[in-house]
Image (cartoon, rainbow, N blue to C red):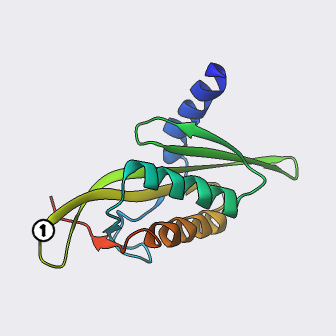
Amino acid sequence: MKTIAALATLIALVLPGCEKPASNLDAKSPAGRIMYPITAEEADAVLYRALRSTAPEADVTAVAGPNKGYVAVINKDRRSYTYYASAVPAVGLRPDGTRVGGYTFEVSGWQSIRAGYLVESINLGAATISAPLPLASK
């Protein structure tokens, strides 16, 4: 089991350099630069449910860092596709200007269409818990 966790962590660290991630941190993303004022446990559950609904055939392994998330591997047509989804701690702004902590999400993967669906699924799942807020500037 430790070998699988170590392999998943290695994949998670290497993978972001192989494919441009889809992220709520990116102003060009469909949702814009947003975060959700949710707990770490809620963010984790949102990620896992989104991966399971978007890629039910995938082998999913938890990854501890650099940001907590999951690696999903799909073996299809003699090929292997790997996706990494993570919850990134973030600070947002409420309408009254107060700052609030929570999470934003990043996804990277080999098939950009499925990665896009995964981002949509994550955002929908998080929005059922709390409405998104704009990211606070540093």
- Quick one: 19 or 39, which is closer to the camera? 39
The residue beneath circle 1 is 98
Q: Position of residue 117 (x, y in %)?
A: 61, 69
- 128 or 68, nearer to the observer: 128
How would you rate the neighbour count of disc 1 (Cα within 10 Å): few for under 14, some for 14-19, many for 20 or more? few
Image coords of residue 138 (percent x, y): 15, 58
Residue in the picture at 59% in, 64% down: 118
Q: Does 44 sit left or right of 72 as displayed?
A: left
Residue at 49 percent across and 46 percent down: it is 16
Residue 131 versus residue 111 in the image, above or below:
below
* Picture quadrant of residue 114: bottom right
Locate residue 5, reporting x and y percent.
60, 28
Viewer-proximal residue among 100 and 117: 100
Looking at the rendered image, the quarter that the N terminus falls into is top right
Q: Position of residue 125 (x, y in %)?
A: 52, 68
Q: Secondary structure at mark 1?
A: loop
Query: Vertical placement of 36 versus 6: above or below?
Result: below
